[in-house]
Image (tube, rainbow, N blue to C red):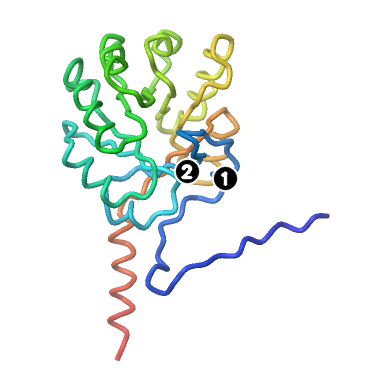
Amino acid sequence: MVEKEIIPSLTSELRSDIVEAPKVIRKATGITLFGKRIKSIIYTMDVAVIANSDADSVLAVYPWTPNTKILEAVSTVANKPILAGIGGGLTKGLRSATIGFFAEESGAQAVVLNAPTTIETIKSVKDVVDIPIIYTVVNDHIDLNERIEAGVKAFNIAGGKNTAKLVAWARTTINDQHPNFPIIASGGKTDDQILATINAGANAITFTAYGITEQIFQTKMEKYRSIH
Protein backbone atom coordinates (compact mmCIF):
# COMPACT_ATOMS: atom_id res chain seq x y z
CA MET A 1 0.00 0.00 0.00
CA VAL A 2 1.36 3.39 -1.06
CA GLU A 3 1.52 5.88 1.79
CA LYS A 4 -0.30 9.17 1.27
CA GLU A 5 2.08 11.92 0.22
CA ILE A 6 2.65 14.56 2.90
CA ILE A 7 2.89 18.12 1.58
CA PRO A 8 5.13 20.42 3.64
CA SER A 9 3.50 23.71 4.66
CA LEU A 10 5.18 27.09 5.09
CA THR A 11 3.47 29.93 6.95
CA SER A 12 4.16 32.47 9.67
CA GLU A 13 2.77 33.34 13.09
CA LEU A 14 1.10 36.49 11.80
CA ARG A 15 -0.51 34.67 8.85
CA SER A 16 -1.66 31.50 10.55
CA ASP A 17 -5.42 32.15 10.29
CA ILE A 18 -5.77 31.36 6.60
CA VAL A 19 -9.31 30.67 5.41
CA GLU A 20 -8.88 27.24 3.85
CA ALA A 21 -11.02 25.70 1.14
CA PRO A 22 -12.43 22.25 1.98
CA LYS A 23 -9.69 19.78 1.04
CA VAL A 24 -12.14 17.47 -0.75
CA ILE A 25 -12.44 20.11 -3.49
CA ARG A 26 -8.97 19.05 -4.69
CA LYS A 27 -10.66 15.93 -6.11
CA ALA A 28 -12.30 18.09 -8.80
CA THR A 29 -10.70 18.25 -12.25
CA GLY A 30 -10.55 22.02 -12.19
CA ILE A 31 -11.00 24.62 -14.92
CA THR A 32 -8.12 26.37 -16.63
CA LEU A 33 -8.72 30.13 -16.77
CA PHE A 34 -6.07 32.03 -18.71
CA GLY A 35 -3.51 29.36 -17.86
CA LYS A 36 -4.36 29.10 -14.15
CA ARG A 37 -6.04 25.94 -12.89
CA ILE A 38 -9.03 26.68 -10.68
CA LYS A 39 -10.73 24.13 -8.42
CA SER A 40 -11.82 26.06 -5.31
CA ILE A 41 -13.74 29.34 -5.59
CA ILE A 42 -14.58 31.34 -2.49
CA TYR A 43 -17.95 33.10 -2.54
CA THR A 44 -17.61 36.26 -0.46
CA MET A 45 -17.44 40.04 -0.71
CA ASP A 46 -15.47 40.36 2.54
CA VAL A 47 -12.15 41.81 1.42
CA ALA A 48 -10.44 40.68 4.65
CA VAL A 49 -11.45 37.08 3.93
CA ILE A 50 -10.43 37.37 0.28
CA ALA A 51 -6.99 38.64 1.28
CA ASN A 52 -6.51 35.72 3.69
CA SER A 53 -7.98 32.81 1.72
CA ASP A 54 -6.18 29.95 -0.03
CA ALA A 55 -8.98 29.58 -2.62
CA ASP A 56 -7.93 29.48 -6.27
CA SER A 57 -10.44 32.17 -7.25
CA VAL A 58 -13.10 34.60 -5.97
CA LEU A 59 -16.78 34.65 -6.90
CA ALA A 60 -17.59 38.34 -6.44
CA VAL A 61 -21.36 38.51 -6.73
CA TYR A 62 -23.83 40.25 -4.45
CA PRO A 63 -27.57 41.11 -4.35
CA TRP A 64 -27.24 44.82 -5.14
CA THR A 65 -26.75 46.62 -8.44
CA PRO A 66 -23.20 45.88 -9.66
CA ASN A 67 -20.80 48.68 -8.84
CA THR A 68 -17.34 49.04 -10.35
CA LYS A 69 -15.98 50.68 -7.17
CA ILE A 70 -16.82 47.51 -5.24
CA LEU A 71 -14.97 45.43 -7.82
CA GLU A 72 -11.98 47.78 -7.55
CA ALA A 73 -11.92 47.18 -3.78
CA VAL A 74 -11.91 43.41 -4.32
CA SER A 75 -9.23 43.71 -7.01
CA THR A 76 -7.00 45.66 -4.62
CA VAL A 77 -6.75 42.80 -2.12
CA ALA A 78 -7.28 39.70 -4.26
CA ASN A 79 -4.15 37.88 -5.42
CA LYS A 80 -6.24 35.43 -7.45
CA PRO A 81 -8.64 35.50 -10.43
CA ILE A 82 -11.94 37.30 -9.88
CA LEU A 83 -15.24 36.11 -11.34
CA ALA A 84 -17.26 39.33 -11.23
CA GLY A 85 -21.03 39.58 -11.12
CA ILE A 86 -22.51 42.02 -13.64
CA GLY A 87 -26.24 41.48 -13.09
CA GLY A 88 -28.55 40.16 -15.76
CA GLY A 89 -31.92 40.51 -14.01
CA LEU A 90 -32.84 44.09 -13.07
CA THR A 91 -29.45 45.15 -14.40
CA LYS A 92 -29.51 43.99 -18.01
CA GLY A 93 -28.82 44.73 -21.66
CA LEU A 94 -26.50 47.63 -22.35
CA ARG A 95 -25.98 48.33 -18.62
CA SER A 96 -24.77 44.77 -17.96
CA ALA A 97 -22.53 44.99 -21.02
CA THR A 98 -21.07 48.31 -19.84
CA ILE A 99 -20.44 46.96 -16.33
CA GLY A 100 -18.85 43.88 -17.94
CA PHE A 101 -16.49 46.10 -19.92
CA PHE A 102 -15.42 47.99 -16.79
CA ALA A 103 -15.10 44.71 -14.87
CA GLU A 104 -12.63 43.50 -17.45
CA GLU A 105 -10.76 46.80 -17.31
CA SER A 106 -10.63 46.49 -13.50
CA GLY A 107 -8.95 43.11 -13.68
CA ALA A 108 -11.79 40.57 -13.60
CA GLN A 109 -10.89 37.31 -15.38
CA ALA A 110 -14.55 36.39 -16.05
CA VAL A 111 -18.00 37.93 -15.72
CA VAL A 112 -20.98 36.22 -14.10
CA LEU A 113 -24.58 36.73 -15.22
CA ASN A 114 -27.42 35.74 -12.93
CA ALA A 115 -30.31 33.39 -13.64
CA PRO A 116 -32.91 35.76 -15.21
CA THR A 117 -30.45 36.92 -17.90
CA THR A 118 -31.94 36.91 -21.40
CA ILE A 119 -30.27 35.70 -24.58
CA GLU A 120 -30.18 39.32 -25.78
CA THR A 121 -28.22 40.43 -22.70
CA ILE A 122 -25.76 37.54 -23.09
CA LYS A 123 -25.12 38.64 -26.68
CA SER A 124 -24.75 42.27 -25.63
CA VAL A 125 -22.10 41.34 -23.07
CA LYS A 126 -20.32 39.05 -25.56
CA ASP A 127 -20.03 41.97 -28.00
CA VAL A 128 -17.94 44.06 -25.57
CA VAL A 129 -15.94 41.72 -23.33
CA ASP A 130 -12.95 39.54 -24.14
CA ILE A 131 -13.17 37.45 -20.97
CA PRO A 132 -15.38 34.39 -20.43
CA ILE A 133 -19.08 34.78 -19.66
CA ILE A 134 -20.37 32.54 -16.87
CA TYR A 135 -24.13 31.98 -16.64
CA THR A 136 -25.84 31.04 -13.37
CA VAL A 137 -28.19 28.05 -13.51
CA VAL A 138 -30.76 27.63 -10.72
CA ASN A 139 -33.25 25.16 -12.22
CA ASP A 140 -33.80 22.82 -15.18
CA HIS A 141 -36.33 25.03 -16.97
CA ILE A 142 -33.91 26.64 -19.42
CA ASP A 143 -32.23 25.78 -22.71
CA LEU A 144 -28.54 25.41 -21.84
CA ASN A 145 -27.35 24.82 -25.41
CA GLU A 146 -29.05 28.03 -26.56
CA ARG A 147 -27.11 30.00 -23.97
CA ILE A 148 -23.84 28.37 -25.00
CA GLU A 149 -24.50 29.33 -28.60
CA ALA A 150 -25.22 32.92 -27.46
CA GLY A 151 -21.75 33.19 -25.92
CA VAL A 152 -21.75 31.55 -22.47
CA LYS A 153 -18.40 29.84 -21.77
CA ALA A 154 -19.18 28.18 -18.41
CA PHE A 155 -22.11 27.48 -16.12
CA ASN A 156 -22.30 28.37 -12.43
CA ILE A 157 -24.85 25.94 -10.99
CA ALA A 158 -26.50 27.00 -7.74
CA GLY A 159 -29.42 24.74 -6.97
CA GLY A 160 -29.30 24.68 -3.18
CA LYS A 161 -29.84 21.15 -1.86
CA ASN A 162 -30.55 20.00 -5.44
CA THR A 163 -27.25 21.22 -6.88
CA ALA A 164 -25.71 17.77 -7.49
CA LYS A 165 -28.87 16.65 -9.27
CA LEU A 166 -28.90 19.86 -11.34
CA VAL A 167 -25.24 19.35 -12.30
CA ALA A 168 -26.02 15.81 -13.49
CA TRP A 169 -28.97 17.13 -15.53
CA ALA A 170 -26.77 19.81 -17.11
CA ARG A 171 -24.10 17.28 -18.06
CA THR A 172 -26.68 15.01 -19.69
CA THR A 173 -28.25 17.96 -21.51
CA ILE A 174 -25.10 19.48 -23.02
CA ASN A 175 -22.65 16.60 -23.44
CA ASP A 176 -23.82 15.58 -26.92
CA GLN A 177 -23.21 19.05 -28.37
CA HIS A 178 -20.68 20.40 -25.90
CA PRO A 179 -18.68 17.64 -24.18
CA ASN A 180 -16.32 18.73 -21.37
CA PHE A 181 -18.09 22.09 -21.05
CA PRO A 182 -16.87 23.89 -17.88
CA ILE A 183 -19.23 23.65 -14.90
CA ILE A 184 -18.80 25.46 -11.59
CA ALA A 185 -21.17 24.51 -8.77
CA SER A 186 -21.88 25.25 -5.13
CA GLY A 187 -20.60 22.37 -3.05
CA GLY A 188 -22.77 22.39 0.05
CA LYS A 189 -21.84 22.31 3.71
CA THR A 190 -20.27 18.85 4.04
CA ASP A 191 -17.51 16.90 2.33
CA ASP A 192 -20.07 14.32 1.19
CA GLN A 193 -22.19 17.00 -0.48
CA ILE A 194 -19.14 18.48 -2.20
CA LEU A 195 -18.00 15.07 -3.40
CA ALA A 196 -21.50 14.29 -4.72
CA THR A 197 -21.43 17.53 -6.70
CA ILE A 198 -17.99 16.70 -8.14
CA ASN A 199 -19.09 13.17 -9.04
CA ALA A 200 -22.16 14.60 -10.77
CA GLY A 201 -19.87 16.48 -13.15
CA ALA A 202 -18.76 19.77 -11.58
CA ASN A 203 -15.23 20.85 -12.52
CA ALA A 204 -14.83 23.52 -9.83
CA ILE A 205 -16.58 24.15 -6.51
CA THR A 206 -17.69 27.34 -4.81
CA PHE A 207 -17.71 27.51 -1.03
CA THR A 208 -19.03 30.23 1.24
CA ALA A 209 -17.33 32.08 4.08
CA TYR A 210 -20.32 33.41 5.98
CA GLY A 211 -19.33 34.89 9.33
CA ILE A 212 -15.73 33.65 9.15
CA THR A 213 -14.27 37.08 10.01
CA GLU A 214 -16.45 37.36 13.10
CA GLN A 215 -15.70 33.76 14.08
CA ILE A 216 -11.93 34.20 13.93
CA PHE A 217 -12.13 37.55 15.68
CA GLN A 218 -14.26 36.06 18.46
CA THR A 219 -11.76 33.23 18.97
CA LYS A 220 -8.88 35.70 19.23
CA MET A 221 -10.78 37.92 21.63
CA GLU A 222 -11.48 34.95 23.91
CA LYS A 223 -7.78 34.17 23.85
CA TYR A 224 -6.87 37.77 24.66
CA ARG A 225 -9.32 37.83 27.58
CA SER A 226 -7.67 34.79 29.11
CA ILE A 227 -4.25 36.44 29.20
CA HIS A 228 -3.36 37.81 32.65
Query: Where 158 falls versus 190 (above or below)?
Result: above
In the rendered image, which quarter is residue 83 located in? top left
Q: Is residue 160 left or right of residue 180?
A: left
Tell me the residue at 37%/72% (across/down): 14
Q: Residue 67: x percent and y percent?
A: 16, 35
Is the Cβ of the residue at disc 2 closer than 8 Å to that at disc 1? yes
Tell me the residue at 57%/28% (across/down): 200
Q: Give the residue at mark 1.
A: 26
Q: Residue 133: x percent and y percent?
A: 36, 23
Q: Give the residue at mark 2.
A: 40
Q: Nearer the viewer, residue 26 or 217?
A: 26
Q: Residue 112: x percent and y percent?
A: 32, 28
Dot 2, how many residues are within 10 Å of its Cα: few (below 14), some (14-19), or many (20+)? many
Q: Earlier in the sequence, mark 2 or mark 1?
A: 1
Classify mark 1: helix, strand or loop: helix
* Tally of marks: 2
- Quadrant for the C terminus in the image: bottom left
Classify mark 2: helix, strand or loop: strand
Single out the residue that lies furthest toward the right. Answer: 1
